[in-house]
Image (cartoon, rainbow, N blue to C red):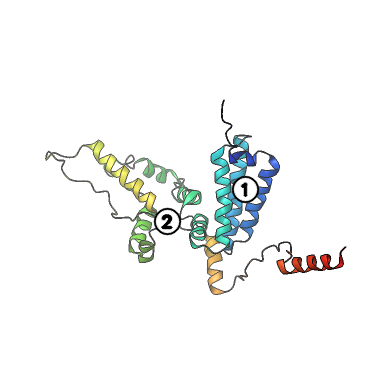
Amino acid sequence: MAIPQTQHWVHNLSTPQQWRHLFRATLRECTYLPDPIARNYMKNHIISRYRTVSSRSPKAGPQVVHAARNALSVLRRANEGYSRPLEKVLLLSYGRTGRRRHELLAKMLTPEIPNDSKALKELLSRPADFSDGWEPPAIVKNLAASQMQNTVVTAARIRPLIKQLEPPIPKQDSWGKELAQCRKKNIRRQWYNNTLCSLLPPLPEKDLQTLEGLMSGTVPWEPIKRRSSKPQVSPTESSGELFRLLARGA
Protein backbone atom coordinates (compact mmCIF):
# COMPACT_ATOMS: atom_id res chain seq x y z
CA MET A 1 0.00 0.00 0.00
CA ALA A 2 1.44 3.33 -1.03
CA ILE A 3 2.09 5.82 1.74
CA PRO A 4 0.38 9.16 1.01
CA GLN A 5 2.90 11.96 0.70
CA THR A 6 2.43 15.35 2.25
CA GLN A 7 1.38 18.11 -0.08
CA HIS A 8 4.23 20.36 -1.18
CA TRP A 9 4.11 23.93 0.11
CA VAL A 10 4.08 25.20 -3.48
CA HIS A 11 0.35 24.45 -3.63
CA ASN A 12 -0.22 27.18 -1.05
CA LEU A 13 0.05 29.65 -3.95
CA SER A 14 -2.12 27.83 -6.43
CA THR A 15 -4.85 30.46 -6.81
CA PRO A 16 -4.68 33.97 -8.30
CA GLN A 17 -5.99 35.44 -5.04
CA GLN A 18 -3.04 34.04 -3.10
CA TRP A 19 -0.57 35.36 -5.66
CA ARG A 20 -2.30 38.74 -5.55
CA HIS A 21 -1.98 38.79 -1.77
CA LEU A 22 1.76 38.02 -1.98
CA PHE A 23 2.26 40.61 -4.72
CA ARG A 24 0.53 43.35 -2.75
CA ALA A 25 2.41 42.47 0.43
CA THR A 26 5.72 42.71 -1.45
CA LEU A 27 4.82 46.07 -2.99
CA ARG A 28 3.75 47.32 0.43
CA GLU A 29 7.16 46.46 1.85
CA CYS A 30 8.78 48.37 -1.03
CA THR A 31 6.97 51.54 0.05
CA TYR A 32 8.45 51.21 3.56
CA LEU A 33 12.08 51.30 2.40
CA PRO A 34 13.86 54.36 3.86
CA ASP A 35 15.91 55.10 0.73
CA PRO A 36 13.93 56.88 -2.05
CA ILE A 37 16.02 55.40 -4.87
CA ALA A 38 15.67 51.89 -3.47
CA ARG A 39 11.97 52.46 -2.91
CA ASN A 40 11.29 53.34 -6.55
CA TYR A 41 13.62 50.77 -8.05
CA MET A 42 12.42 47.82 -5.97
CA LYS A 43 8.80 48.67 -6.74
CA ASN A 44 9.45 48.70 -10.49
CA HIS A 45 11.65 45.61 -10.20
CA ILE A 46 8.98 43.60 -8.39
CA ILE A 47 6.29 44.62 -10.89
CA SER A 48 8.55 43.68 -13.80
CA ARG A 49 9.40 40.28 -12.31
CA TYR A 50 5.77 39.39 -11.66
CA ARG A 51 4.74 40.45 -15.17
CA THR A 52 7.55 38.42 -16.72
CA VAL A 53 6.61 35.28 -14.81
CA SER A 54 2.89 35.66 -15.48
CA SER A 55 3.45 36.10 -19.22
CA ARG A 56 5.86 33.17 -19.39
CA SER A 57 3.72 30.50 -17.79
CA PRO A 58 0.24 30.49 -16.23
CA LYS A 59 1.37 28.02 -13.55
CA ALA A 60 4.37 28.84 -11.40
CA GLY A 61 6.85 26.17 -10.37
CA PRO A 62 8.56 25.69 -7.01
CA GLN A 63 11.52 27.91 -7.93
CA VAL A 64 9.26 30.84 -8.83
CA VAL A 65 7.29 30.48 -5.61
CA HIS A 66 10.49 30.32 -3.59
CA ALA A 67 11.84 33.45 -5.31
CA ALA A 68 8.60 35.34 -4.64
CA ARG A 69 8.54 34.38 -0.97
CA ASN A 70 12.25 35.15 -0.61
CA ALA A 71 11.79 38.63 -2.10
CA LEU A 72 9.09 39.41 0.45
CA SER A 73 11.24 38.04 3.27
CA VAL A 74 14.28 40.11 2.25
CA LEU A 75 12.24 43.31 2.06
CA ARG A 76 10.59 42.70 5.42
CA ARG A 77 13.89 42.03 7.16
CA ALA A 78 15.44 45.06 5.47
CA ASN A 79 12.66 47.27 6.80
CA GLU A 80 13.09 45.74 10.24
CA GLY A 81 16.70 46.91 10.29
CA TYR A 82 18.67 43.75 9.54
CA SER A 83 21.93 44.82 7.91
CA ARG A 84 22.42 41.96 5.44
CA PRO A 85 18.99 42.21 3.75
CA LEU A 86 19.16 46.02 3.73
CA GLU A 87 22.60 45.90 2.13
CA LYS A 88 21.32 43.47 -0.49
CA VAL A 89 18.42 45.78 -1.36
CA LEU A 90 20.70 48.81 -1.63
CA LEU A 91 23.25 47.00 -3.80
CA LEU A 92 20.48 45.93 -6.17
CA SER A 93 18.91 49.38 -6.25
CA TYR A 94 22.14 51.26 -6.91
CA GLY A 95 23.32 48.91 -9.64
CA ARG A 96 26.22 47.41 -7.72
CA THR A 97 24.84 43.90 -8.27
CA GLY A 98 22.02 42.28 -10.16
CA ARG A 99 19.99 43.28 -13.17
CA ARG A 100 20.38 47.04 -12.91
CA ARG A 101 24.15 46.76 -12.93
CA HIS A 102 24.01 44.92 -16.26
CA GLU A 103 21.62 47.53 -17.64
CA LEU A 104 23.90 50.41 -16.60
CA LEU A 105 26.92 48.63 -18.06
CA ALA A 106 25.14 47.99 -21.35
CA LYS A 107 24.11 51.63 -21.57
CA MET A 108 27.64 52.76 -20.76
CA LEU A 109 29.17 50.50 -23.43
CA THR A 110 26.72 51.42 -26.19
CA PRO A 111 28.88 52.49 -29.17
CA GLU A 112 28.47 56.00 -30.45
CA ILE A 113 26.91 56.50 -33.88
CA PRO A 114 29.36 58.19 -36.30
CA ASN A 115 28.36 61.74 -37.11
CA ASP A 116 30.03 61.97 -40.51
CA SER A 117 31.92 59.92 -43.08
CA LYS A 118 35.28 60.67 -41.46
CA ALA A 119 34.16 59.24 -38.14
CA LEU A 120 32.73 56.23 -39.96
CA LYS A 121 36.04 55.54 -41.73
CA GLU A 122 37.88 55.83 -38.43
CA LEU A 123 35.48 53.36 -36.86
CA LEU A 124 35.90 50.87 -39.71
CA SER A 125 39.68 51.15 -39.62
CA ARG A 126 39.91 50.00 -36.02
CA PRO A 127 41.30 46.50 -35.40
CA ALA A 128 38.90 43.63 -34.89
CA ASP A 129 37.92 42.69 -31.37
CA PHE A 130 40.83 41.35 -29.27
CA SER A 131 43.27 41.23 -32.19
CA ASP A 132 46.64 43.03 -32.25
CA GLY A 133 46.14 46.76 -31.83
CA TRP A 134 42.77 46.37 -30.14
CA GLU A 135 42.03 48.72 -27.26
CA PRO A 136 39.09 48.60 -24.84
CA PRO A 137 36.73 51.59 -24.70
CA ALA A 138 38.25 54.60 -22.98
CA ILE A 139 35.47 54.71 -20.40
CA VAL A 140 36.30 51.14 -19.33
CA LYS A 141 39.98 51.93 -18.80
CA ASN A 142 39.25 55.20 -16.99
CA LEU A 143 36.65 53.62 -14.72
CA ALA A 144 38.91 50.66 -13.96
CA ALA A 145 41.81 52.97 -13.09
CA SER A 146 39.54 55.04 -10.85
CA GLN A 147 38.33 51.95 -8.99
CA MET A 148 41.86 50.70 -8.43
CA GLN A 149 42.80 54.02 -6.81
CA ASN A 150 39.64 54.23 -4.69
CA THR A 151 40.37 52.72 -1.28
CA VAL A 152 36.69 52.68 -0.29
CA VAL A 153 35.73 50.53 -3.27
CA THR A 154 38.71 48.27 -2.68
CA ALA A 155 37.86 47.76 0.99
CA ALA A 156 34.15 47.18 0.34
CA ARG A 157 34.85 44.24 -2.00
CA ILE A 158 31.46 44.51 -3.64
CA ARG A 159 32.91 43.17 -6.88
CA PRO A 160 36.13 41.24 -7.61
CA LEU A 161 39.17 43.48 -7.45
CA ILE A 162 40.75 44.80 -10.64
CA LYS A 163 44.38 43.73 -10.61
CA GLN A 164 45.65 44.85 -14.01
CA LEU A 165 44.80 47.66 -16.42
CA GLU A 166 46.29 45.82 -19.39
CA PRO A 167 45.86 42.22 -20.54
CA PRO A 168 48.84 40.15 -19.27
CA ILE A 169 50.18 38.85 -22.58
CA PRO A 170 53.57 37.10 -22.26
CA LYS A 171 56.14 37.67 -24.99
CA GLN A 172 56.88 33.96 -25.38
CA ASP A 173 55.14 30.70 -24.67
CA SER A 174 56.53 27.84 -22.58
CA TRP A 175 58.59 26.62 -25.58
CA GLY A 176 60.27 29.99 -26.06
CA LYS A 177 58.32 30.80 -29.21
CA GLU A 178 56.16 33.78 -30.02
CA LEU A 179 52.69 33.50 -28.57
CA ALA A 180 50.04 32.40 -31.07
CA GLN A 181 47.48 34.96 -32.21
CA CYS A 182 44.56 32.88 -30.99
CA ARG A 183 46.15 32.69 -27.54
CA LYS A 184 46.64 36.46 -27.47
CA LYS A 185 43.01 37.03 -28.40
CA ASN A 186 41.84 34.65 -25.69
CA ILE A 187 43.95 36.44 -23.07
CA ARG A 188 42.56 39.83 -24.12
CA ARG A 189 39.00 38.49 -24.13
CA GLN A 190 39.36 36.95 -20.67
CA TRP A 191 40.95 40.10 -19.25
CA TYR A 192 38.20 42.27 -20.73
CA ASN A 193 35.40 40.06 -19.39
CA ASN A 194 36.99 39.97 -15.93
CA THR A 195 37.34 43.74 -15.97
CA LEU A 196 33.69 44.22 -16.91
CA CYS A 197 32.72 41.82 -14.13
CA SER A 198 34.54 44.05 -11.63
CA LEU A 199 33.33 47.44 -12.84
CA LEU A 200 30.85 49.52 -10.87
CA PRO A 201 28.98 51.59 -13.48
CA PRO A 202 28.17 55.22 -12.65
CA LEU A 203 24.63 56.09 -11.62
CA PRO A 204 22.31 58.17 -13.80
CA GLU A 205 22.34 61.91 -13.25
CA LYS A 206 18.88 61.83 -11.69
CA ASP A 207 19.97 59.44 -8.94
CA LEU A 208 23.14 61.44 -8.31
CA GLN A 209 21.09 64.61 -7.86
CA THR A 210 18.82 62.80 -5.40
CA LEU A 211 21.80 61.63 -3.35
CA GLU A 212 23.37 65.08 -3.41
CA GLY A 213 20.08 66.61 -2.29
CA LEU A 214 19.75 64.15 0.58
CA MET A 215 23.29 64.90 1.76
CA SER A 216 22.90 68.67 1.48
CA GLY A 217 19.41 68.71 2.95
CA THR A 218 17.72 70.26 -0.09
CA VAL A 219 15.74 67.06 -0.64
CA PRO A 220 13.56 66.44 2.44
CA TRP A 221 13.64 63.02 4.03
CA GLU A 222 11.24 61.59 6.57
CA PRO A 223 10.84 58.03 7.80
CA ILE A 224 8.01 56.19 6.12
CA LYS A 225 5.02 55.57 8.37
CA ARG A 226 3.93 51.97 8.35
CA ARG A 227 0.29 51.11 8.07
CA SER A 228 -1.14 50.61 11.54
CA SER A 229 -2.25 47.11 12.40
CA LYS A 230 -5.50 46.17 14.06
CA PRO A 231 -5.50 46.80 17.82
CA GLN A 232 -5.12 43.65 19.84
CA VAL A 233 -6.67 43.03 23.23
CA SER A 234 -4.02 42.52 25.89
CA PRO A 235 -4.12 39.34 28.01
CA THR A 236 -4.87 41.34 31.16
CA GLU A 237 -7.90 43.00 29.57
CA SER A 238 -9.23 39.73 28.22
CA SER A 239 -8.79 38.00 31.60
CA GLY A 240 -10.53 40.92 33.34
CA GLU A 241 -13.52 40.69 31.03
CA LEU A 242 -13.68 36.94 31.59
CA PHE A 243 -13.60 37.45 35.37
CA ARG A 244 -16.45 39.99 35.23
CA LEU A 245 -18.46 37.66 33.02
CA LEU A 246 -18.02 34.80 35.49
CA ALA A 247 -18.85 37.07 38.44
CA ARG A 248 -22.09 38.30 36.85
CA GLY A 249 -23.05 34.83 35.73
CA ALA A 250 -24.32 36.09 32.39
Secondary structure category for the residue under label 1:
helix
103 in relation to 128, above or below: below
Rendering quarter of residue 130: top left
The quadrant of the rendering that contains the C terminus is bottom right
> Looking at the image, how many numbered discs can be counted on the residues?
2
Q: Observer-nearest residue: 116 or 61?
A: 61
Q: Observer-nearest residue: 206 or 121?
A: 206
Task: Mark yes or no: residue 215 visible.
Answer: yes
What residue is drawn where x is 60% and y is 46%? 48
What residue is drawn where x is 66% and y is 44%? 19
Q: Give the numbered dot on residue 237.
A: none
Expressed as whole percent of the image width and height from the top left, the position of residue 243 reads: 79, 67
Callouts 2 and 1 close, C-beta under 8 Å: no
Report the side of 163 relative to 140 (left or right). Answer: left
Expressed as whole percent of the image width and height from the top left, the position of residue 249 reads: 86, 64
The quadrant of the rendering that contains the N terminus is top right
Rendering quarter of residue 163: bottom left
Q: Give the numbered dot on residue 47.
A: 1
Say which amino acid is labelled 1: Ile
Secondary structure category for the residue under label 2:
loop
Point out the residue furthest to the left here. 176
> How far apart are the alpha carbons under marks 2 and 1?
25 Å
Expressed as whole percent of the image width and height from the top left, the position of residue 144 reads: 35, 56
- First in residue order: circle 2 vs circle 1: 1
What residue is drawn where x is 37% and y is 40%? 124
Q: Residues within 10 Å of mark 1 (few under 14, many from 20)?
A: some
Residue, disc 2: 200
Q: Observer-nearest residue: 30 or 62?
A: 62
206 in relation to 212, above or below: above
